[in-house]
Amino acid sequence: MSEGSDDGRRAPPALDQFGMPIKGGEAPARRRVRRSSQGNGSGTVTAERAAPAAEPDTREQEATQQKVVIGVFCAMLIGITVLQKIGIGPSGAIIPVILPIALIALGAGVLFARPVFRPERAMLYLAVVVTSALSTVLFSPSFSLSSIGLYFLLYLPFLVAFDTTPETHRKCLSLFSNLMLVFAVIVWIQHAIQFSIGWQYWPDLDKLVPSQYLVPEFLYIQPIQFGMKYMKPSGITFLEVSFISQFITLALIIELLFLQRMVRAVFFGATLFATFAGTGLALLLVALPIVFTRMNIRTFVTVLATAFIALFVALQLQWFDMVADRMGEFDKQGSSGSSRFVEPLDRVRRALLDPSAVYSGVGPGQIERGGNIFWWPIVKAIVEYGLIQGVLLYAFLLFSMFDRTPSRQFAIILILWYSFEGTLLTPLNPIALVMLSSMFILRDAPRTRRSRSGAAASAVPAAA
Protein backbone atom coordinates (compact mmCIF):
# COMPACT_ATOMS: atom_id res chain seq x y z
CA MET A 1 0.00 0.00 0.00
CA SER A 2 1.47 3.34 -1.01
CA GLU A 3 2.40 5.86 1.61
CA GLY A 4 0.12 8.87 1.85
CA SER A 5 -2.95 7.12 0.48
CA ASP A 6 -6.37 6.69 2.10
CA ASP A 7 -7.59 3.65 0.19
CA GLY A 8 -4.50 1.94 -1.19
CA ARG A 9 -3.92 4.43 -4.00
CA ARG A 10 -1.39 7.26 -4.07
CA ALA A 11 -2.67 10.67 -3.19
CA PRO A 12 -3.02 13.00 -6.21
CA PRO A 13 -0.07 15.36 -6.79
CA ALA A 14 -0.27 19.03 -5.99
CA LEU A 15 -1.10 21.22 -8.99
CA ASP A 16 0.22 24.65 -9.91
CA GLN A 17 -1.91 27.64 -10.94
CA PHE A 18 -2.16 26.28 -14.51
CA GLY A 19 -3.34 22.84 -13.44
CA MET A 20 0.02 21.15 -14.12
CA PRO A 21 1.48 18.71 -11.57
CA ILE A 22 4.36 19.96 -9.44
CA LYS A 23 7.44 17.73 -9.41
CA GLY A 24 7.86 15.95 -6.12
CA GLY A 25 4.83 17.79 -4.77
CA GLU A 26 1.90 16.26 -2.93
CA ALA A 27 -1.35 17.59 -1.72
CA PRO A 28 -1.06 19.01 1.83
CA ALA A 29 -1.55 16.35 4.46
CA ARG A 30 -4.14 18.39 6.33
CA ARG A 31 -6.24 18.72 3.20
CA ARG A 32 -7.54 15.20 3.18
CA VAL A 33 -10.08 14.13 0.59
CA ARG A 34 -12.63 11.43 0.23
CA ARG A 35 -13.88 9.73 -2.90
CA SER A 36 -17.53 9.18 -3.41
CA SER A 37 -18.63 5.68 -4.35
CA GLN A 38 -21.20 7.19 -6.66
CA GLY A 39 -20.61 8.10 -10.29
CA ASN A 40 -18.71 6.47 -13.17
CA GLY A 41 -15.67 5.45 -11.16
CA SER A 42 -13.71 8.65 -11.53
CA GLY A 43 -14.73 9.68 -8.01
CA THR A 44 -16.02 13.01 -6.70
CA VAL A 45 -13.55 14.91 -4.55
CA THR A 46 -15.05 16.71 -1.53
CA ALA A 47 -13.13 18.97 0.88
CA GLU A 48 -13.79 18.33 4.57
CA ARG A 49 -12.03 21.21 6.19
CA ALA A 50 -14.59 24.03 5.74
CA ALA A 51 -17.33 22.85 8.11
CA PRO A 52 -15.29 22.60 11.35
CA ALA A 53 -13.80 26.06 10.75
CA ALA A 54 -17.22 27.70 11.11
CA GLU A 55 -17.89 26.30 14.59
CA PRO A 56 -15.56 28.59 16.61
CA ASP A 57 -16.98 31.65 14.82
CA THR A 58 -20.51 30.55 15.67
CA ARG A 59 -19.64 30.02 19.32
CA GLU A 60 -17.91 33.38 19.52
CA GLN A 61 -20.88 35.14 17.94
CA GLU A 62 -23.24 33.37 20.32
CA ALA A 63 -21.16 34.41 23.34
CA THR A 64 -21.09 38.01 22.13
CA GLN A 65 -24.87 38.08 21.74
CA GLN A 66 -25.37 36.80 25.28
CA LYS A 67 -22.95 39.45 26.58
CA VAL A 68 -25.03 42.10 24.82
CA VAL A 69 -28.16 40.84 26.59
CA ILE A 70 -26.36 41.12 29.93
CA GLY A 71 -25.22 44.64 28.97
CA VAL A 72 -28.79 45.67 28.17
CA PHE A 73 -29.89 44.32 31.54
CA CYS A 74 -27.09 46.17 33.37
CA ALA A 75 -27.95 49.49 31.74
CA MET A 76 -31.60 49.16 32.72
CA LEU A 77 -30.66 47.98 36.22
CA ILE A 78 -28.49 51.04 36.86
CA GLY A 79 -31.16 53.35 35.48
CA ILE A 80 -33.93 51.84 37.58
CA THR A 81 -32.01 51.90 40.88
CA VAL A 82 -28.97 54.22 41.01
CA LEU A 83 -30.65 56.83 38.76
CA GLN A 84 -34.20 56.21 39.95
CA LYS A 85 -34.66 59.72 41.31
CA ILE A 86 -33.13 61.49 38.28
CA GLY A 87 -35.35 62.93 35.55
CA ILE A 88 -35.10 65.04 32.42
CA GLY A 89 -37.46 67.36 30.59
CA PRO A 90 -39.17 70.72 31.03
CA SER A 91 -40.63 71.82 34.34
CA GLY A 92 -43.94 70.09 34.99
CA ALA A 93 -43.21 67.32 32.47
CA ILE A 94 -40.09 65.64 33.88
CA ILE A 95 -39.59 62.08 32.65
CA PRO A 96 -37.52 59.64 34.76
CA VAL A 97 -34.22 58.97 33.01
CA ILE A 98 -34.86 55.23 33.15
CA LEU A 99 -37.20 55.52 30.14
CA PRO A 100 -34.65 56.88 27.62
CA ILE A 101 -32.00 54.54 29.09
CA ALA A 102 -34.29 51.55 28.56
CA LEU A 103 -35.18 52.59 25.00
CA ILE A 104 -31.54 53.15 24.04
CA ALA A 105 -30.36 49.92 25.69
CA LEU A 106 -33.08 47.82 24.06
CA GLY A 107 -32.37 49.49 20.72
CA ALA A 108 -28.70 48.54 21.02
CA GLY A 109 -29.77 45.03 21.92
CA VAL A 110 -31.87 44.79 18.77
CA LEU A 111 -28.82 45.77 16.69
CA PHE A 112 -26.19 43.58 18.33
CA ALA A 113 -27.96 40.70 20.09
CA ARG A 114 -30.44 38.17 18.79
CA PRO A 115 -33.92 39.72 19.08
CA VAL A 116 -36.95 37.48 18.76
CA PHE A 117 -39.96 38.87 16.93
CA ARG A 118 -43.23 37.72 18.45
CA PRO A 119 -46.15 38.64 16.14
CA GLU A 120 -48.70 38.05 18.91
CA ARG A 121 -47.14 40.78 21.02
CA ALA A 122 -47.09 43.17 18.06
CA MET A 123 -50.75 42.54 17.25
CA LEU A 124 -51.89 43.01 20.84
CA TYR A 125 -49.85 46.21 21.21
CA LEU A 126 -51.29 47.52 17.94
CA ALA A 127 -54.80 46.74 19.22
CA VAL A 128 -54.11 48.74 22.40
CA VAL A 129 -52.75 51.71 20.45
CA VAL A 130 -55.51 51.79 17.81
CA THR A 131 -58.46 51.36 20.17
CA SER A 132 -57.08 53.83 22.72
CA ALA A 133 -56.33 56.44 20.05
CA LEU A 134 -59.77 56.08 18.44
CA SER A 135 -61.51 56.24 21.82
CA THR A 136 -59.60 59.40 22.68
CA VAL A 137 -60.18 61.18 19.36
CA LEU A 138 -63.82 60.20 18.90
CA PHE A 139 -65.27 60.29 22.41
CA SER A 140 -63.04 62.17 24.88
CA PRO A 141 -64.08 65.80 25.44
CA SER A 142 -60.55 66.67 26.59
CA PHE A 143 -57.28 64.85 26.87
CA SER A 144 -53.55 65.27 27.43
CA LEU A 145 -51.47 64.62 24.32
CA SER A 146 -48.32 64.11 26.42
CA SER A 147 -50.14 61.55 28.56
CA ILE A 148 -51.24 59.38 25.63
CA GLY A 149 -47.81 59.73 24.00
CA LEU A 150 -46.05 58.58 27.16
CA TYR A 151 -48.53 55.72 27.46
CA PHE A 152 -47.75 54.34 24.01
CA LEU A 153 -43.99 54.89 24.36
CA LEU A 154 -43.76 53.37 27.83
CA TYR A 155 -45.23 50.01 26.80
CA LEU A 156 -43.33 49.77 23.52
CA PRO A 157 -40.36 47.93 25.19
CA PHE A 158 -42.60 44.90 25.78
CA LEU A 159 -42.22 44.16 22.06
CA VAL A 160 -38.48 43.54 22.45
CA ALA A 161 -37.26 40.13 23.54
CA PHE A 162 -33.97 38.27 23.20
CA ASP A 163 -33.00 34.67 22.69
CA THR A 164 -31.48 33.93 26.10
CA THR A 165 -29.67 30.96 27.60
CA PRO A 166 -30.46 29.84 31.16
CA GLU A 167 -26.91 30.85 32.16
CA THR A 168 -27.42 34.40 30.91
CA HIS A 169 -30.75 34.71 32.72
CA ARG A 170 -29.18 33.49 35.95
CA LYS A 171 -26.31 35.98 35.61
CA CYS A 172 -28.76 38.84 35.18
CA LEU A 173 -30.72 37.87 38.28
CA SER A 174 -27.48 37.52 40.22
CA LEU A 175 -26.49 41.05 39.16
CA PHE A 176 -29.83 42.36 40.45
CA SER A 177 -29.32 40.58 43.77
CA ASN A 178 -25.73 41.85 44.08
CA LEU A 179 -26.75 45.47 43.52
CA MET A 180 -29.63 45.21 45.98
CA LEU A 181 -27.20 43.74 48.49
CA VAL A 182 -25.26 47.01 48.24
CA PHE A 183 -28.44 49.02 48.84
CA ALA A 184 -29.38 46.78 51.76
CA VAL A 185 -26.03 47.62 53.36
CA ILE A 186 -26.74 51.32 52.70
CA VAL A 187 -30.04 50.98 54.60
CA TRP A 188 -28.17 49.72 57.67
CA ILE A 189 -25.56 52.45 57.31
CA GLN A 190 -28.34 55.04 57.26
CA HIS A 191 -29.72 53.59 60.48
CA ALA A 192 -26.26 53.68 62.07
CA ILE A 193 -25.90 57.35 61.11
CA GLN A 194 -29.28 58.42 62.43
CA PHE A 195 -28.94 56.50 65.69
CA SER A 196 -25.50 58.03 66.30
CA ILE A 197 -25.33 61.58 64.92
CA GLY A 198 -28.77 62.07 63.37
CA TRP A 199 -30.55 61.44 60.06
CA GLN A 200 -29.78 65.02 58.98
CA TYR A 201 -26.33 63.76 58.03
CA TRP A 202 -27.68 61.37 55.40
CA PRO A 203 -26.63 62.18 51.81
CA ASP A 204 -29.68 64.01 50.46
CA LEU A 205 -30.22 64.10 46.69
CA ASP A 206 -32.80 66.86 47.15
CA LYS A 207 -29.88 69.06 48.20
CA LEU A 208 -27.12 67.58 46.06
CA VAL A 209 -28.95 67.54 42.69
CA PRO A 210 -30.66 70.58 41.11
CA SER A 211 -34.44 70.35 41.38
CA GLN A 212 -34.91 70.44 37.58
CA TYR A 213 -33.21 67.01 37.38
CA LEU A 214 -35.25 65.33 40.13
CA VAL A 215 -38.46 63.35 39.69
CA PRO A 216 -41.08 65.27 41.72
CA GLU A 217 -44.17 64.31 43.75
CA PHE A 218 -42.62 61.57 45.88
CA LEU A 219 -42.04 61.58 49.65
CA TYR A 220 -38.26 61.20 49.76
CA ILE A 221 -37.80 61.28 53.56
CA GLN A 222 -40.56 60.41 56.02
CA PRO A 223 -40.68 59.55 59.73
CA ILE A 224 -41.05 55.99 60.94
CA GLN A 225 -44.12 57.15 62.83
CA PHE A 226 -45.81 60.54 62.89
CA GLY A 227 -44.03 62.80 65.39
CA MET A 228 -41.05 60.46 65.69
CA LYS A 229 -37.52 61.85 65.29
CA TYR A 230 -36.28 58.77 63.40
CA MET A 231 -36.76 58.47 59.62
CA LYS A 232 -37.27 55.56 57.25
CA PRO A 233 -34.12 54.88 55.21
CA SER A 234 -34.74 55.09 51.46
CA GLY A 235 -31.34 53.93 50.22
CA ILE A 236 -30.34 57.47 49.14
CA THR A 237 -31.10 57.03 45.42
CA PHE A 238 -34.65 55.65 45.63
CA LEU A 239 -37.69 57.88 45.23
CA GLU A 240 -39.09 56.86 48.60
CA VAL A 241 -38.81 54.08 51.14
CA SER A 242 -41.68 52.06 49.65
CA PHE A 243 -39.69 51.52 46.45
CA ILE A 244 -36.53 50.25 48.12
CA SER A 245 -38.61 47.92 50.27
CA GLN A 246 -40.27 46.52 47.13
CA PHE A 247 -36.95 46.03 45.34
CA ILE A 248 -35.41 44.33 48.38
CA THR A 249 -38.43 42.03 48.42
CA LEU A 250 -37.90 41.22 44.73
CA ALA A 251 -34.24 40.41 45.48
CA LEU A 252 -35.36 38.17 48.34
CA ILE A 253 -37.82 36.37 46.04
CA ILE A 254 -35.08 35.92 43.42
CA GLU A 255 -32.85 34.33 46.04
CA LEU A 256 -35.60 31.94 47.12
CA LEU A 257 -36.78 31.03 43.63
CA PHE A 258 -33.55 30.89 41.64
CA LEU A 259 -30.26 31.38 43.48
CA GLN A 260 -30.99 29.54 46.74
CA ARG A 261 -28.50 31.50 48.88
CA MET A 262 -30.17 31.34 52.25
CA VAL A 263 -27.75 33.60 54.14
CA ARG A 264 -28.35 36.39 51.66
CA ALA A 265 -32.12 35.74 51.72
CA VAL A 266 -32.14 36.10 55.51
CA PHE A 267 -30.18 39.36 55.25
CA PHE A 268 -32.68 40.73 52.72
CA GLY A 269 -35.53 39.72 55.03
CA ALA A 270 -33.97 41.53 57.98
CA THR A 271 -33.36 44.62 55.83
CA LEU A 272 -36.98 44.57 54.70
CA PHE A 273 -38.08 44.90 58.31
CA ALA A 274 -35.47 47.63 58.81
CA THR A 275 -37.08 49.81 56.13
CA PHE A 276 -40.31 50.05 58.20
CA ALA A 277 -42.29 50.09 54.93
CA GLY A 278 -45.47 48.07 54.57
CA THR A 279 -45.55 47.75 50.76
CA GLY A 280 -42.53 45.45 50.53
CA LEU A 281 -43.84 43.29 53.34
CA ALA A 282 -47.27 43.08 51.69
CA LEU A 283 -45.62 41.94 48.44
CA LEU A 284 -43.66 39.28 50.32
CA LEU A 285 -46.77 37.94 52.05
CA VAL A 286 -48.56 37.65 48.70
CA ALA A 287 -45.53 36.06 47.03
CA LEU A 288 -44.63 33.45 49.65
CA PRO A 289 -47.45 30.97 48.78
CA ILE A 290 -46.25 31.11 45.15
CA VAL A 291 -42.59 30.79 46.15
CA PHE A 292 -43.33 27.77 48.34
CA THR A 293 -44.47 25.80 45.28
CA ARG A 294 -40.86 25.83 44.00
CA MET A 295 -39.09 25.11 47.28
CA ASN A 296 -37.68 21.81 48.43
CA ILE A 297 -38.41 20.61 51.96
CA ARG A 298 -35.09 21.78 53.40
CA THR A 299 -35.45 25.32 52.04
CA PHE A 300 -39.10 25.48 53.13
CA VAL A 301 -38.23 24.50 56.72
CA THR A 302 -35.37 27.02 56.79
CA VAL A 303 -37.60 29.85 55.55
CA LEU A 304 -40.37 28.94 57.97
CA ALA A 305 -37.99 28.83 60.95
CA THR A 306 -36.46 32.16 59.93
CA ALA A 307 -39.93 33.71 59.63
CA PHE A 308 -40.82 32.64 63.18
CA ILE A 309 -37.56 34.09 64.52
CA ALA A 310 -38.16 37.35 62.63
CA LEU A 311 -41.70 37.51 64.01
CA PHE A 312 -40.45 37.06 67.57
CA VAL A 313 -37.77 39.75 67.16
CA ALA A 314 -40.29 42.14 65.59
CA LEU A 315 -42.64 41.67 68.53
CA GLN A 316 -39.84 42.31 71.01
CA LEU A 317 -38.82 45.51 69.23
CA GLN A 318 -42.48 46.63 68.99
CA TRP A 319 -42.11 46.81 65.21
CA PHE A 320 -45.78 46.07 64.67
CA ASP A 321 -46.81 48.84 67.03
CA MET A 322 -44.94 51.35 64.86
CA VAL A 323 -46.59 50.26 61.61
CA ALA A 324 -49.90 48.83 62.86
CA ASP A 325 -51.72 52.13 62.48
CA ARG A 326 -51.57 51.55 58.69
CA MET A 327 -53.68 48.42 59.06
CA GLY A 328 -56.66 50.35 60.33
CA GLU A 329 -56.74 52.83 57.46
CA PHE A 330 -58.91 50.88 55.04
CA ASP A 331 -62.17 52.32 56.35
CA LYS A 332 -60.85 55.89 56.74
CA GLN A 333 -61.50 57.98 53.65
CA GLY A 334 -58.40 59.82 52.46
CA SER A 335 -56.01 57.55 54.36
CA SER A 336 -53.21 55.67 52.62
CA GLY A 337 -54.87 52.26 53.01
CA SER A 338 -58.18 53.51 51.68
CA SER A 339 -56.53 55.34 48.76
CA ARG A 340 -54.56 52.26 47.73
CA PHE A 341 -57.17 49.53 48.05
CA VAL A 342 -60.70 50.90 48.48
CA GLU A 343 -61.00 54.02 46.37
CA PRO A 344 -59.58 52.41 43.16
CA LEU A 345 -62.32 49.78 43.18
CA ASP A 346 -64.97 52.38 43.90
CA ARG A 347 -63.70 54.57 41.05
CA VAL A 348 -64.05 51.73 38.53
CA ARG A 349 -67.53 50.95 39.83
CA ARG A 350 -68.60 54.57 39.35
CA ALA A 351 -67.06 54.72 35.87
CA LEU A 352 -68.85 51.59 34.68
CA LEU A 353 -72.24 52.98 35.68
CA ASP A 354 -72.10 54.84 32.35
CA PRO A 355 -72.74 52.37 29.46
CA SER A 356 -70.32 54.29 27.20
CA ALA A 357 -67.49 53.42 29.59
CA VAL A 358 -67.23 50.08 27.80
CA TYR A 359 -65.52 51.76 24.83
CA SER A 360 -64.59 55.26 26.03
CA GLY A 361 -63.31 57.10 29.09
CA VAL A 362 -62.77 60.55 30.51
CA GLY A 363 -59.65 61.03 28.39
CA PRO A 364 -55.89 60.50 28.88
CA GLY A 365 -54.57 62.37 31.88
CA GLN A 366 -58.05 63.37 33.07
CA ILE A 367 -58.50 61.06 36.06
CA GLU A 368 -58.55 62.82 39.43
CA ARG A 369 -55.14 63.79 40.78
CA GLY A 370 -53.75 65.19 43.98
CA GLY A 371 -54.18 64.35 47.62
CA ASN A 372 -53.31 60.81 48.60
CA ILE A 373 -54.97 59.09 45.64
CA PHE A 374 -53.22 56.01 44.24
CA TRP A 375 -54.70 54.59 41.04
CA TRP A 376 -53.94 51.02 40.02
CA PRO A 377 -52.82 50.68 36.37
CA ILE A 378 -56.01 48.86 35.36
CA VAL A 379 -58.14 51.53 37.04
CA LYS A 380 -56.44 54.39 35.22
CA ALA A 381 -56.61 52.53 31.89
CA ILE A 382 -60.33 51.77 32.22
CA VAL A 383 -61.37 55.18 33.52
CA GLU A 384 -59.35 57.17 30.97
CA TYR A 385 -59.67 54.95 27.88
CA GLY A 386 -62.52 52.47 28.44
CA LEU A 387 -63.14 48.92 29.60
CA ILE A 388 -62.17 47.30 26.29
CA GLN A 389 -58.90 49.21 26.18
CA GLY A 390 -58.05 48.27 29.77
CA VAL A 391 -58.71 44.58 29.07
CA LEU A 392 -56.58 44.72 25.90
CA LEU A 393 -53.72 46.31 27.84
CA TYR A 394 -53.72 43.50 30.38
CA ALA A 395 -54.00 40.87 27.65
CA PHE A 396 -50.89 42.38 26.06
CA LEU A 397 -49.02 42.49 29.38
CA LEU A 398 -49.97 38.96 30.41
CA PHE A 399 -49.02 37.47 27.07
CA SER A 400 -45.68 39.31 27.09
CA MET A 401 -44.90 38.23 30.64
CA PHE A 402 -45.75 34.55 30.10
CA ASP A 403 -44.36 34.25 26.57
CA ARG A 404 -41.73 31.49 27.05
CA THR A 405 -40.86 33.09 30.37
CA PRO A 406 -37.98 31.71 32.45
CA SER A 407 -40.33 31.36 35.45
CA ARG A 408 -44.12 31.50 35.52
CA GLN A 409 -44.07 31.86 39.30
CA PHE A 410 -41.89 34.95 39.12
CA ALA A 411 -43.99 36.38 36.29
CA ILE A 412 -47.14 36.02 38.44
CA ILE A 413 -45.44 37.82 41.34
CA LEU A 414 -44.30 40.65 39.08
CA ILE A 415 -47.79 41.09 37.60
CA LEU A 416 -49.31 41.23 41.10
CA TRP A 417 -46.68 43.79 42.16
CA TYR A 418 -47.35 45.94 39.11
CA SER A 419 -51.13 45.68 39.43
CA PHE A 420 -51.49 46.72 43.07
CA GLU A 421 -48.30 48.64 43.91
CA GLY A 422 -47.48 50.14 40.50
CA THR A 423 -48.90 52.90 38.34
CA LEU A 424 -49.75 53.09 34.64
CA LEU A 425 -47.42 55.94 33.63
CA THR A 426 -44.59 55.69 36.17
CA PRO A 427 -41.74 54.20 34.07
CA LEU A 428 -40.28 52.39 37.07
CA ASN A 429 -42.97 49.72 37.12
CA PRO A 430 -43.39 48.62 33.47
CA ILE A 431 -39.64 48.89 32.81
CA ALA A 432 -39.02 46.58 35.77
CA LEU A 433 -41.41 44.02 34.23
CA VAL A 434 -39.48 44.17 30.96
CA MET A 435 -36.09 43.95 32.68
CA LEU A 436 -36.95 41.05 34.98
CA SER A 437 -39.18 38.93 32.74
CA SER A 438 -40.56 39.86 29.33
CA MET A 439 -37.22 40.64 27.62
CA PHE A 440 -36.06 37.05 28.15
CA ILE A 441 -37.17 34.41 25.66
CA LEU A 442 -35.64 31.38 27.28
CA ARG A 443 -33.99 29.03 24.82
CA ASP A 444 -35.31 25.50 24.80
CA ALA A 445 -32.87 22.89 25.99
CA PRO A 446 -31.54 20.75 23.13
CA ARG A 447 -33.38 17.48 22.80
CA THR A 448 -31.56 14.25 21.97
CA ARG A 449 -33.34 12.10 19.43
CA ARG A 450 -33.03 8.36 19.84
CA SER A 451 -32.79 6.38 16.60
CA ARG A 452 -33.68 2.75 16.15
CA SER A 453 -30.12 1.93 15.22
CA GLY A 454 -28.92 2.71 18.72
CA ALA A 455 -26.72 5.22 20.48
CA ALA A 456 -23.95 4.98 17.93
CA ALA A 457 -26.14 6.40 15.20
CA SER A 458 -27.16 9.37 17.36
CA ALA A 459 -23.54 10.43 17.62
CA VAL A 460 -23.31 10.98 13.86
CA PRO A 461 -24.31 14.55 12.90
CA ALA A 462 -27.08 14.96 10.37
CA ALA A 463 -26.00 15.78 6.85
CA ALA A 464 -26.36 19.38 5.82
Image (cartoon, rainbow, N blue to C red):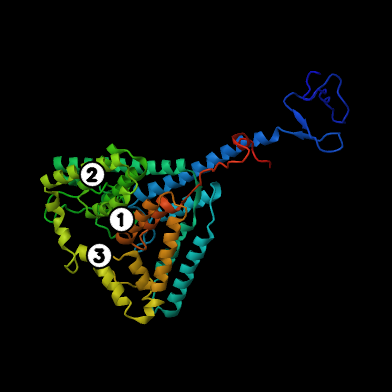
| Residue identifier under label 2 | 304
Badge 1: few (under 14), some or many (20 or more) residues near its Cα, within 10 Å? some
Name the residue tied to disc 3.
Answer: 341
Tell me the SS state at disc 1. helix
x 14%, y 42%: residue? 195
**Residue at the (53%, 53%) spot, across then down:** 116
- Determine which quarter of the picture holds residue 11: top right
Measured in 3D between alpha carbons, the distance from the residue under mark 3 to the one under mark 2, in whole angstroms, is: 28 Å
Residue that extends furthest to the front in the rendered view of this protein: 452
Earlier sequence position, callout 3 versus callout 2: 2
Q: Could you tell me which residue is drawn at 49 percent across and 53 percent down?
A: 161
Mark 1 to mark 3: distance in Å? 32 Å
Q: Residue at x 47, y 75 (%)?
A: 134
Name the kind of residue labelled 1 in the image.
Ser
- Where does residue 101 sit, x and y in percent of width and height? 43, 52
Q: Are marks 1 and 3 in contact (CB under 8 Å)?
A: no
Residue 5 horizontal/vertical position (percent): 79, 22
The x, y position of residue 109, in whole percent, is: 51, 49
**Label number found at residue 211:** 1
Please state, as top left, top right, bottom left or bottom right, where the C terminus lies in the image.
top right
Q: Nearer the viewer, mark 1 or mark 3?
A: 3
